[in-house]
Image (tube, rainbow, N blue to C red):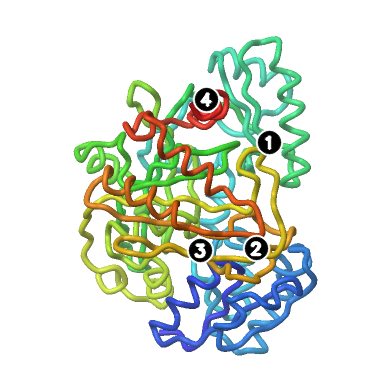
Amino acid sequence: MFNKILVANRGEIALRVICACKELGIGTVAVYSEADRNSLHVRFADEAVCIGPARSSESYLNIPSVISAAEITNVDAIHPGYGFLSENANFAKVCEASEITFIGPRPEIIEIMGEKDRARREVKVAGLPTIPGSDGAIEGEEQLAQEAAKIGYPLILKAVAGGGGRGMRVVRKQEELLAAYETARSEAQTAFGTPEVYAERFLEHPRHIEFQVLGDQHGKVIHLGERECSIQRRHQKLIEESPSPGIDPKRRKELGAKVVKALEKIGYTNAGTVEFLMDQSGEIFFIEMNTRIQVEHPVTELITGVDLIKAQIRIAAGEKMEDAAGEIHFSGHAIECRINAEDPVTFVPSAGRITTFQAPGGTGVRVDSAAYADAVIPPYYDSMIAKLIVKGRDRDEAIGRMKRALEMFVIEGIKTSIPLHRRILTHPDFSAGKIDTGFIERFLGSNGK
């Protein structure tokens, strides 16, 4: 087992990793920007190193600074959390070259899954269903027209190196195709440094389903069930739950087996998430894989009893799956609400000082956060300040528990998304599990009524 781990992240995920390390008896090193000097992950780590100014490009994304901090503190491994450098294959390679264990998949796997068109080809060969689309990036207007004719309308153009909804354009008729292609390429170049895009069939109002997986270094891969992530705005998830109300046990078993078989063929290691879209007929298609721990991992932890961060660490240290994760048993239903520092109506970020922070408690309630009263939410990073997670015996109890917990969650001094979540949970379609990726658009269009 490792003696000391550097956490290359900030906020609640950095604190989450530090907690797991403390329970395993592993020393921790926090890195922080000048804006995060008073953050809780800095306070509770055994050691802390300032790695640069507030801008993430000069601190949390600065690979030489992170590696230098790791070397001067003599760590064995680096946990990247999510975001920032977590899916950066070059960072994983630099860790290897520096003889520091990267707690995640091998660099070559990160590279494969980071290129969406390449990932689609790999998993298709490995046996997962994929959305009909172009075989790789589109090279020029002639191929664009050919692919559009083959796929049909509506179709969607996606950045090869994309994520977060950037470099994506839906095309509903031929007259829109060329302009959408140029816009998607321009956005992709700005956001990801490459203009390459590919095309695939656009699914109207699908459900967003993802499977949590773990793979050890001895060839063993398991899945820990699926999560429903359909409640999202502009491709950013707001509410996640497990199990999905749209997947029955038989379907879960069949799809889970396919996921495991495919990742064993690929040789996947450590934690990851295989993401799918399910159309209105129930047909399901692979869209991408995230080669890291997810923001929404707590809902899986609550229904399986597996500490995914500890499992990541143990797998990276060479332990076998049965020791790293134990036997998997599913029970109950869990829901997570992402509490963001933003106006619940306009979605404008709300940076500033928190004057009151009173988190809810009680049976089946968990809060993952690095926020506290008098903490300052800086304007430089993601707006999420807390994750509220609940578990119930079934979905109805989980919804009732989440409603109660949201009412008892008091954050003052800044605006938060708590009022929005409270409105969503009272909507009859959400209560009935009639949700898809278009839910929020319809919800906001009707003023939540």
Residue at 74% across, 43% down? 194
Q: Which residue is mark 1?
A: 167
Marks 4 and 1, how far apart in space?
Answer: 23 Å
**Which residue is found at the position 27% from the left and 59% from the top?**
304
Q: Which mark is residue 106?
A: 3
- Give whichever of discs 2 and 1 has the lower sequence position: 2
Which numbered dot is residue 90?
2
The answer for how far apart the CA atoms under marks 4 and 2 are is 41 Å
Q: Is residue 134 visible?
A: no
Q: What amino acid is labelled 2 in the image?
A: Asn
What residue sits 29% from the left and 68% below the top?
Answer: 325
Callout in the foreground (4, 2): 4
- Give how far apart the Cα atoms at labels 1 and 3 are: 27 Å
Among numbered discs 2 and 3, the one appearing first in the sequence? 2
Quarter of the image for the N terminus: give it: bottom left
Say few, some or many: other residues with alpha carbon within 10 Å of mark 4 (under 14 / 14 to 19 / 20 or more).
Answer: few
